[in-house]
Image (cartoon, coloured by chain):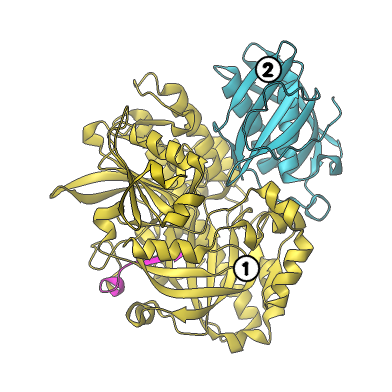
């Protein structure tokens, strides 16, 4: 994207003033280099979002923004039901409540090194990953509806984890307002044997080591120390979420004209919040969120079992669980007035600053952990929400690196064996069923996550707390 | 059944270059920054849909590695041809996800906005098929079904992986 198309307001803030059908401005948070690397489609998609009814303040792009579907990935937009606002299935996407859960382990790198290979093999055996893999659970109709209503809380009640896990999970592990009746039978069928599975593509389970700390206050509160071993789990609502996205994208795209909504791109499919379809989608999407929370909870349990089999002294505790494909009803102060808004974050992470009422008490002083996934073989980050992100982006920050090249380009440049060998030489063990899948996810196919995180910090969205490097990566 | 014809072009434009005369029937992928586009060409919409489905299977694995051991019938209905393409691909994604199968060949018939198809394939064998990704859904992004010449149809969209 040519920076000359934008109004620069600071080194990391760029505006597109409203013209034509735009109801509000578009604002991008990024360095000039990141802007230069962004596809022009990000500009086009962000402008399209600003035309949707009831949008409040601005449409935002995070530093990792890239070409998505309807919304750019790394896009944030909030809508007010009282102002005719909409909820957009395209603004949440297929991978409902995809997110990252980080676990501390009570282990150091030295503890891990001697049995790293065994741990990698044990995790790969116990964590179902990749197309066609199935979980240990088979949910009947009654169990499915209970899971969709209660999320991670349901999983804990079935013995998959501990109550303490829920306090470190967004929404305390249970998204309120879920409506299993609004979820199609096809979506439920698709999830029947997929509970506790990782998925594929950019989803992963990584064992990581804390290589650098930037802020002692928050690191201590988060339980992070240099050389600590951490586990990160990146996945979402699996087949149920994908099917909810498929079902409602079509329903909303077909109904848009009945609602008098002009869609500049059918993928922006949306419905008024104050409509039956809008409310049905909210109920289904919240059920999908619960499915994602339950899924990461079960994966946490399986990870604990794998560690216990190899390293009995391990003590895996949830650091935090935060989603980055969501629409959530939140209160934000607009021009001095608190308003209830439906904040869409598509490839963007909620980043509440210190003192926010929805934070667990122990995070009140330092802000919410913001978990930034890297790509296979590159580093990940733990950030902390800042008060400045509230007025700047409805308390949102980036979610990851974003691809720098297409999957095809990656497979032309690398093969899976070569990637595995190169990473092994750096002490990183990869376990994945598909060599082509490894090539498509090669570290070089992604942007430098450090540059993205630096831009997020400079823009005041979230501050750096710790940098994590991978030791083991289980790929879907 | 048509014979799968694999061509892959790395172009930067979602639609083929004007004047390009693709072999018919055939399929190809086109780039999307995060995901991948699937495109089929045929003498009629049904043939283009058939090829687009093969292109989608090729996102997951090499269609030539799949044996036609099982048969499945699929029906879709949609308000227009473009939504019908999305429905068709999503119907296949659903069958792949719930039956744990992969498909290698299709026989597609379209009457107005109603599709009737037979799909041939087999159960997923992770070691043999080496599935690179799971396709989550067919999207409306870069969605086009159109005649590019009187007897040449194109059917394409981006799929989320």
* Chain A on-screen colour: yellow
Tag 1: Cα neighbours inside 10 Å, few (<14), some, or many (≥20)?
many
Residue sticking out furthest to the left? A336
Query: Is A471 left or right of A451, judged from the image as shown?
Result: right
Disc 1 with disc 2 on a shared chain? no
Residue denoted by label 1: A377
Residue denoted by label 2: B148
Residue sticking out furthest to the front? A4
Spot occupied by residue B90 in the image (x, y as percentages of width and height): 62, 33
Which element type, helix, strand or loop, lies under badge 1?
loop
Q: Is A364 a magenta residue?
A: yes
Spot occupied by residue A401 in the image (x, y as percentages of width and height): 52, 58
Q: Nearer the viewer, mark 1 or mark 2?
A: 2
Which element type, helix, strand or loop, lies under badge 2?
strand
The answer to the question of whether label 1 and label 2 lie on touching residues, with beta carbons closer than 8 A, is: no
Q: How many marks?
A: 2
Q: Residues in magenta?
A: A362-371
Query: Is B1 left or right of A57, judged from the image as shown?
Result: right
- The residue shown at (84%, 52%) is B128
Q: Chain of mark 1?
A: A
Tag 2: Cα neighbours inside 10 Å, few (<14), some, or many (≥20)?
some
Q: Is A302 a magenta residue?
A: no
Chain the render paints cyan: B
């Amino acid at each position: 994207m040519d920076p000359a198309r934008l109004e620069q307001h600071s080194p990391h803030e760029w505006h597109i003033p409203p013209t034509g059908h735009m109801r509000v401005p578009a604002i991008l948070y990024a360095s000039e280099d990141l802007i230069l690397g962004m596809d022009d489609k990000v500009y086009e998609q962000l402008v399209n979002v600003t035309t949707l009814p009831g949008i409040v303040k601005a449409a935002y792009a995070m530093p990792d923004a890239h070409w998505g579907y309807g919304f750019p990935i790394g896009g944030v937009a909030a809508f007010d039901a009282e102002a005719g606002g909409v909820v957009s299935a395209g603004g949440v996407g297929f991978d409902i409540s995809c997110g990252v859960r980080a676990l501390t382990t009570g282990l150091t790198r030295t503890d891990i090194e001697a049995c790293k290979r065994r741990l990698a093999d044990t995790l790969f055996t116990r964590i179902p990953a990749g197309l066609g893999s199935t979980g240990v659970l088979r949910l009947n109709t009654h169990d499915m509806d209970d899971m969709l209503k209660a999320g991670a809380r349901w999983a804990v009640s079935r013995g998959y984890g501990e109550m303490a896990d829920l306090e470190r999970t967004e929404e305390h592990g249970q998204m309120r307002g879920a409506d299993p009746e609004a979820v199609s039978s096809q979506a439920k069928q698709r999830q029947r044997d997929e509970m506790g599975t990782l998925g594929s593509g950019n989803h992963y389970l990584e064992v990581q080591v804390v290589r650098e700390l930037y802020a002692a206050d928050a690191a201590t509160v988060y339980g992070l120390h240099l050389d600590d071993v951490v586990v990160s789990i990146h996945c979402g609502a699996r087949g149920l979420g994908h099917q909810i996205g498929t079902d409602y994208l079509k329903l909303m795209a077909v109904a848009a004209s009945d609602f008098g909504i002009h869609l500049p791109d059918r993928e922006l499919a949306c419905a008024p919040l104050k409509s039956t379809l809008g409310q049905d989608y909210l109920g289904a999407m919240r059920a999908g969120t619960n499915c994602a929370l339950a899924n990461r909870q079960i994966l946490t349990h399986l990870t604990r079992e794998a560690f216990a089999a190899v390293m009995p002294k391990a003590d895996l505790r949830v650091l935090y669980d935060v989603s980055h494909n969501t629409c959530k009803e939140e209160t934000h102060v607009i021009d001095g007035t608190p308003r209830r808004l439906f904040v869409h974050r598509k490839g963007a992470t909620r980043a509440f600053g210190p003192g926010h009422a929805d934070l667990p008490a122990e995070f009140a002083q330092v802000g919410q952990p913001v978990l930034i996934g890297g790509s296979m073989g590159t580093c990940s980050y733990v950030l902390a929400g800042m008060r400045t992100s509230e007025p700047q982006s409805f308390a949102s920050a980036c979610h990851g690196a974003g691809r720098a090249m297409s999957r095809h380009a990656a497979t032309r440049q690398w093969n899976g064996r070569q990637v595995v060998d190169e990473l092994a030489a750096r002490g990183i063990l990869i376990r994945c069923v598909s060599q082509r899948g490894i090539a498509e996810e090669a570290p070089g196919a992604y942007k430098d996550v450090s540059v993205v995180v630096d831009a997020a910090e400079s823009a005041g969205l979230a501050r750096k707390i710790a940098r994590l490097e991978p030791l083991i990566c289980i790929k879907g | 059944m048509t014979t799968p014809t694999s061509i892959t072009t790395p172009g930067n434009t979602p639609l083929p270059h004007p004047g390009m005369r693709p072999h018919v029937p055939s399929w190809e992928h086109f780039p999307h920054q995060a995901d991948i586009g699937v495109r089929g060409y045929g003498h009629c919409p049904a043939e283009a849909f058939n090829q687009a489905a093969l292109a989608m299977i090729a996102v997951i694995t090499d269609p030539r590695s799949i044996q036609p051991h099982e048969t499945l019938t699929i029906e879709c209905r949609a308000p227009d041809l473009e939504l019908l393409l999305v429905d068709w691909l999503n119907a296949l994604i659903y069958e792949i996800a719930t039956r744990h199968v992969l498909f290698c060949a299709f026989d597609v018939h379209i009457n107005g906005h109603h599709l009737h198809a037979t799909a041939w394939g087999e159960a997923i064998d992770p070691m043999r098929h080496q599935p690179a990704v799971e396709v989550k859904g067919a999207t409306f992004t870069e969605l086009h079904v159109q005649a590019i010449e009187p007897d040449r149809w194109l059917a394409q969209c981006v799929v989320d992986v």
